[in-house]
C-alpha cells in the first residue's frame, strides 16, 4: 500500500477538521499547491514543487471539478533537462496568440509559428507544446484536496475507443450522453502502449446527489481556480555589462612656437679713407673670401 493510495480513501470523520493541527503545521509547513504528475509514466503527488508520494498503479479514479477553457502553449528554446524548471521563451494562454508580455514572440499568430510545424521539435514533434490544465479530486475524497493535473498534448488530442479516449474526445462524449463531467467518476489510466507519458479516460459511475454537491462546491473553490490558471515566471534579463567611458583624448603636445628673430639693424658703413695705392702683387695677397 502506497502513501497516495491511502489518501484515495476518505479521511475518517473523526480526523476531519477545518484546518490542520498545530503539530502538522509545525512539521509540514504551509501546505500550498498540490498537483498530480505523470512524469515517467507514474502517478506522483507534488506539493509545493516537491514530490511527496507516488502511486505505481496504472489507473486512478478522480472527479474533474474544473478545467481551463483553452489549451496552453509553451515553447522552450533550450533542450529539456530533467529536474530543471526554466520558464518558457514563448507561450500562449489561449493557444492562438503569444502572450502580450513576451518581448520577442516566435510569431504573431500561433497557427503560423515556425515552432508549430511538425518536425520543429525532437522526434518529428512540434517544438511548441500543448497542455491542458484540470482541477481534480480523488473519487474517494471529493470534499478533500483539489489537485492540479496538467495534460500533455497526447492526452488531450486524438481518437480512441470507448474505454481509452484522450481528454477532449472524452469530454465531448460525456456531454453527448446528456451528463456533466463533474457529475461522474472518471478513470484516468496510463497508456502502456505510449513511449511517452499519456493518459486515457473513461467513465466509471454517476455521482450521488451529495457527491455532486461536493464536486460543484470544489469547482467554485479558490483551489480549483488556482489549479487551472497558468502563471509564467518571466526570464530574468541578464545584466548588461556596464559601458566604459571612452578614454579622454590625450592632450596634444604643444607645438613649438616658431621663433622669429628680431631683425638686426645693419650697421652703417663707416667712411673709409681710400688706402694708398699699392702694387698689384700686394693687392692680390690682401684679398679675402668674405663678402661684405
Image (spheres, rainbow, N blue to C red):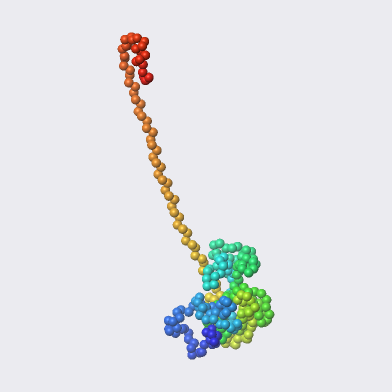
Quadrant in the picture for residue 183: bottom right
Residue plotted at (38% across, 36% down): 256
Q: Is residue 22 above or below residue 287?
A: below
Q: How many marks?
A: 0
Q: Is residue 159 above or below residue 90?
A: below
As rendered, which of 30 and 267 lies closer to the eye?
A: 267
Classify the position of the N terminus by image quarter. Answer: bottom right
Image location of residue 187, percent across then percent down: 61, 83
Image location of residue 194, percent across then percent down: 63, 76
Residue plotted at (67% across, 76% down): 159
Is any atom of residue 197 visible in this view? yes
As rendered, which of 106 and 45 lies closer to the eye?
A: 45
Image location of residue 60, percent across then percent down: 59, 83
As rendered, which of 270 and 60 lies closer to the eye?
A: 270
Image location of residue 55, percent across then percent down: 56, 82
Classify the position of the C terminus by image quarter. Answer: top left
Q: Is residue 17 left or right of residue 125?
A: left
Q: Is residue 138 above or below residue 91?
A: below
Residue plotted at (51% across, 67% down): 234
Q: Is residue 18 above or below residue 231?
A: below
Quadrant in the picture for residue 105: bottom right
Residue plotted at (43% across, 81% down): 26
Quadrant in the picture for residue 148: bottom right
Is any atom of residue 96 visible in this view? no
Amino acid at each position: 500500500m502506497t502513501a497516495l493510495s491511502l489518501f484515495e480513501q476518505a479521511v475518517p470523520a473523526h480526523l476531519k477538521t477545518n484546518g490542520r493541527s498545530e503539530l502538522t503545521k509545525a512539521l509540514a509547513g504551509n501546505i500550498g499547491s498540490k498537483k498530480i504528475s505523470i512524469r515517467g509514466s507514474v502517478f506522483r503527488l507534488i506539493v509545493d514543487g516537491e514530490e511527496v508520494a507516488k502511486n505505481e498503479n496504472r489507473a486512478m479514479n478522480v472527479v474533474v471539478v474544473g478545467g481551463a477553457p483553452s489549451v496552453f502553449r509553451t515553447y522552450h528554446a533550450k533542450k529539456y533537462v530533467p529536474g530543471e524548471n526554466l520558464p518558457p521563451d514563448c507561450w500562449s494562454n489561449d493557444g492562438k496568440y503569444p502572450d502580450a508580455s513576451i518581448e520577442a514572440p516566435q510569431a504573431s499568430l500561433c497557427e503560423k509559428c515556425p515552432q508549430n510545424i511538425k518536425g520543429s521539435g525532437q522526434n518529428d514533434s512540434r517544438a511548441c507544446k500543448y497542455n491542458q490544465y484540470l482541477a481534480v479530486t480523488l473519487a474517494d475524497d471529493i470534499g478533500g484536496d483539489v489537485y492540479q493535473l496538467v495534460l500533455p498534448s497526447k492526452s488531450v488530442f486524438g481518437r480512441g475507443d470507448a474505454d481509452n479516449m484522450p481528454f477532449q474526445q472524452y469530454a465531448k462524449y460525456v456531454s453527448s450522453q446528456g451528463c456533466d463531467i463533474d457529475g461522474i467518476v472518471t478513470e484516468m489510466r496510463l497508456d502502456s502502449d505510449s513511449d511517452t507519458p499519456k493518459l486515457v479516460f473513461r467513465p466509471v459511475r454517476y455521482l450521488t446527489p451529495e457527491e455532486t454537491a461536493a464536486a460543484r462546491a470544489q469547482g467554485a473553490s479558490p483551489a480549483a481556480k488556482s489549479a487551472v490558471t497558468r502563471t509564467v515566471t518571466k526570464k530574468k534579463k541578464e545584466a548588461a555589462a556596464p559601458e566604459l567611458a571612452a578614454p579622454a583624448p590625450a592632450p596634444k603636445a604643444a607645438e613649438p612656437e616658431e621663433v622669429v628673430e628680431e631683425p638686426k639693424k645693419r650697421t652703417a658703413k663707416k667712411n673709409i679713407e681710400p688706402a694708398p695705392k699699392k702694387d698689384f702683387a700686394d693687392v692680390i695677397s690682401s684679398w679675402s673670401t668674405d663678402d661684405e
